[in-house]
Amino acid sequence: MVEKQKKPVTHFTINIPMLLFLALCMSQHPLLSHCQLDYNFYYKTCPLLEGIVRNGVWSAIMNDTRIAASILRLHFHDCIVNGCDASVLLDDTVDMTGEKNAGPNRNSLRGFEVIDNIKADVEKNCPSTVSCVDILTLAARDAVVLSGGSYWYVQLGRRDGTTANDQAANQQIPSPFEPLDNITAKFTSKGLDIKDVVLLSGAHTIGFAQCFTFKRRLFDFKGSGKPDPNLNSNLLQNLQSTCPSSDSTNSNKLAPLDPVTISKFDNVYYKNLLNNSGLLESDQALLIDPKTASMVDYYSKYPYMYTSDFGASMVKLSNVGILTGQNGQIRKKCRSVN
Ligand code: HEM
Ligand SMILES: *[C@@H]1O[C@H](CO)[C@@H](O)[C@H](O)[C@H]1NC(C)=O
Ligand SMILES: *[C@@H]1O[C@H](CO)[C@@H](O)[C@H](O)[C@H]1NC(C)=O
Ligand SMILES: *[C@@H]1O[C@H](CO)[C@@H](O)[C@H](O)[C@H]1NC(C)=O
């Protein structure tokens, strides 16, 4: 099991980068709001927080293994749209069409009830103290750990947004059908880079995708009348039987993103790409593009490097566009603003 999160040991040697970092952090620029986060943010106000979140994720996984993947994806879809602010958790209201029902999310995102249940437990212990976005950030980390993946320390103190935007979700969430350069542009606009695209796409080592997200690869790829040439022929046969072309009622049927180790968080995703067994076009694109192929090769060979680098990219992701200090609010319920 996982150790209780402790503040990592820091060695206080003053150096130029550190002075620069402190100066930047003290300037309170909005782009630097992650400087106001702290590993021990709720140490006094909600000491049981991390255990409550881990238990909630654990019992959800015991009931449904796939939920780990769903929670991780929830966190990504929260952060990539106007920053990590738990906006993805907000229900639509008469005045606001939120993100939940935006194209990439409707009938696709799962795990909202898990976050609701954890939030209810947290509220019982420490009312109006812990943000929904911090809960989701911790839950995503725990989902990876409990699936056999890496552990990373999560800084806390994010605050919840008060709006959600369906248009932003439609525009900012990457599509499996768009070129890698477009996906990379969406990441770089958030302060992430092409290495983060490769590392974070490795989250597709767990979870499932619906037929409609990859079906065009199976029969008539881009009007060629043939399947995608970059799709392993054994996998092609399996997928064609899961999603037969004759039948349009099966567009919601599921195929595993990593068919070799379906619910284990490992580097087999990258090994699959070398084998032309990436499920989505956007997965296999990482091997086709020479800018990313060498990274795919590297992470397929060095699982320990994948473990540590994935954690570092997740930390970057979970600090995108966050609200801290007096901004935003601590929602009482994750589905609605106070
Ligand atoms: C790089 C661009 C990405 C694209 C184009 C993409 C696209 C998709 C699509 C189409 C699905 C299947 C959805 C469905 O069929 O309902 C999916 C599932 C998933 N995605 Fe991504 N994704 C991307 C990046 C990420 C990132 C960065 C993460 C997390 C760090 C992530 C985590 C997941 C997980 C875990 C699932 C499975 C969810 C489940 O089984 O409930 N994805 N993604
Ligand atoms: C267990 O998982 C199923 C499938 O995801 C879900 O419908 C159900 O609500 C879950 N039950 C509990 C108690 O979480
Ligand atoms: C990719 O981005 C370019 C430039 O922004 C845009 O013109 C093009 O329509 C995008 N392609 C897709 C498939 O989204
Ligand atoms: C290569 O692809 C096949 C078909 O998807 C798969 O069963 C096999 O395990 C893959 N090999 C490796 C080394 O990943």
Image (cartoon, helix red, strand yellow):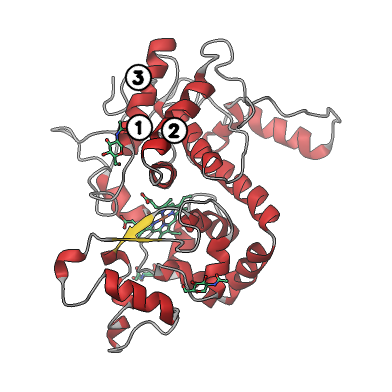
Q: Which residue is mark 1?
A: 114
How packed mark 3 is, by other alpha carbons closer than 10 Å (few <14, some 14-19, many 20 or more), is: some
Instruction: Establish if 265 lies above or below 60.
Output: below
* Residue 306 quadrant: bottom right
Q: Does the closest atom of ligand 2 sit within 8 Å of the Cβ of label 1? A: yes
Q: Marks 1 and 3: in contact by CB < 8 Å?
A: no
The mark nearer the N terminus, 1 or 2, is 2
Type of amino acid at the residue the image marks with label 2: Val
The percent coordinates of residue 54 (x first, y second) are 50, 28
Secondary structure under badge 1?
A: helix
Instruction: Pick out the residue farthest to the front.
Output: 62
The mark nearer the N terminus, 3 or 2, is 2
Tag of residue 259: none
Q: Which residue is mark 2?
A: 57
Q: Marks 2 and 1: in contact by CB < 8 Å?
A: yes
Q: Of 218 and 36, which appears nearest the observer?
A: 218
Secondary structure under badge 3?
A: helix
Q: Of 119 and 93, which appears nearest the observer?
A: 119
Residue 79: tell me if it is visible: no
Kindly report the distance in space between the C-alpha atoms of the residues bearing marks 3 and 1.
Answer: 10 Å
Tag of residue 120: 3
* Residue 219 quadrant: bottom left
